[in-house]
Image: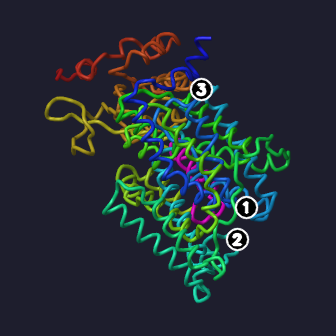
Amino acid sequence: MNTWVHKFPIAKRFSLDPASLKDDLIAGITVSLVAIPQSLAYAQLAGVPAYYGLYAALIPTIVGALFGSSRQLSTGPVAMTSLLTAASVAPLAPHGSATFYSFVILLALLSGIFQILFGVLRVGVLLNFLSQPVLMGFINAAAIIIGLSQLPTLLGIPAQQSNHFLLDIWQVLTHIDTMHELSLVFGVSSIVLLLSFKKFAPRLPGVLVTVALLTWVSYALHFERLGGRVVGEIPQGLPNFSVPPMDWHASMSLMPAAFVIALISFMEAMSSAKVIALKTRRPWDENKELIGQGLAKVAAAFSQSMPVSGSFSRSALNLASNARTHLSSIISAASVLLTLLFFTPLLHHLPKPVLAAIIMMAVANLINFRSISNAWRASRDDGLASLVTFLSTLAFAPNIQNGILTGIILSLALLMYRMMRPRIVLLGMHQDATLRDAKLHNLPHLHPKLGALRFDGALRFVNVSYFEDAVLKLERDNPEITQILVQCSGINELDASGVEMLAILAARLKNNGITLNLSGIKKQVWVVMERTGLVDKIGKDNIYPTDREALDSIYLKLGQPAI
């Protein structure tokens, strides 16, 4: 029982301290003022009716708060997950059809199950396979795609949806003369208002004020009658709770997309949780959070909604509003509930170009090309992985999940390549009597009959042939050589393939009149060498604890004085 309480400490979720309750109440209401209009906008991005967004900000938010580990993490609809949802379902069903909506609900269930399994099996650490450069390449491309996807709505131009997103946007631009001018006015006005609030009145709920003001203007001008697109009727009351529609063939088709959504949405939630933990100095558990986020997605499916995730922007607002416990998220959900029960008629005349502007402004902060250039400066491999992910995500759009998969595969392939070819340097004697990189420091050879090299990396099956080739090349390039020294301080692991290769290599060199010497062996490597008998095969007299002892002994063998 204590184990389950530790995993799901619902009883410890809230505080009865008056000061804490007050802070949570203010934070919850503040977040809801942003969450309600954002939820409507992200539902539009996901290709589902607006009320799906409100449903996603209700029960899933409560479930995420009850079962997650981060106190200030706000769960609900987010831009990236919404875009992935639309992109994943679009190839399987016509946009706007009942089948499309049922597949969105099914996708929420499948991605939630993936996350729950990740958490139960405690494989949260495996999410580190998605490297930061790949993630940043994907986020930059996805942010651009999200912004461009709202262009038709902002301009009031009907847009066709094909398998080539960039061509669809080009078609919109070539038909810009057919735009609905009043829609553009509403969209541009929204952007101007949102930027003004951000710069001059950041403490005010700019998104809510913008939505309220322009909804009133839309009602006064009869925007809907003038050809503009509005949110329309939103069902009043609670969502219908039912078992998600099950379809075996659709489930198999959506499985890869569900895996990607589970991966990406948790990376987004994890980045928020890390920032929160850093600022609050409270620990969080990635496996608990995986379970919490997974259960939130499952709850979304059973409440006929779309996939959800931890929101970076709303979590930051929650933290900035001094939220103390998970109660702030419950209060935010309660505000959404009040909206569903009493205020949905007020949203009927909300112009869709306004929602498009909200989405554009939300994702503008995600674009950060400097992260790609920084990855390139740090490592050409990281830069290449980030750039390829960025370009492939744009090229594959609307199937952007293929872009992130391309980046993951490439980064793992580059990692494997680096493991296969670790750094090997020839060594020379530095003026301080230590062995250094001969090429880097322009050092002469140690001795015509002595060659030395250093291997930087674990000696495993993937790189044993590379190590062996380097030693044999040293032998070929120096016909007079009789002693080879391998500085082993950079070798931190030795597997069975490495043991077998060293034994064979030592015997081969011995047959050619050459002695293989080792120095600076780490404890964990020495244990493996002793356990496998490799020490005896190489010879204890040829293994030295330090480079200095190795060189002194080898020079004496060569008839030279010690250093």
Residue ID at (57%, 41%): 334
Q: Residue 480: percent from the left, percent from the top?
A: 34, 35
Question: Residue at horizontal 77%, vertical 52%?
Answer: 103
Kind of residue at badge 2: Gln
Tag 2 residue: 161
Q: Is 66 part of what is drawn in magenta? A: no
Pointers 1 and 2 in contact (C-beta within 8 Å): yes
In space, the residues marked 3 and 2 are separated at their CA atoms by: 39 Å
Drawn side of residue 246 relative to residue 419, left or right: right
Residue identified by numbered label 3? 122
Q: CA distance from mark 1 to mark 2?
A: 9 Å
Q: Which residues are magenta?
A: 393-416
> Residue 456 lies in what quarter of the image?
top left
- In front: 527, or 340? 340
Q: Quadrant of residue 47?
A: bottom right
Instruction: Give the amino acid type for the residue marked by disc 3 in the picture.
Output: Arg
Q: Decide which of 258, 227 is in the foreground and name it.
A: 227
According to the picture, the residue beneath numbered tag 1 turns out to be: 90
The nearer-to-camera label among 1 and 3 is: 1
What's the magenta bit mostly, secondary-structure-wise?
Answer: helix
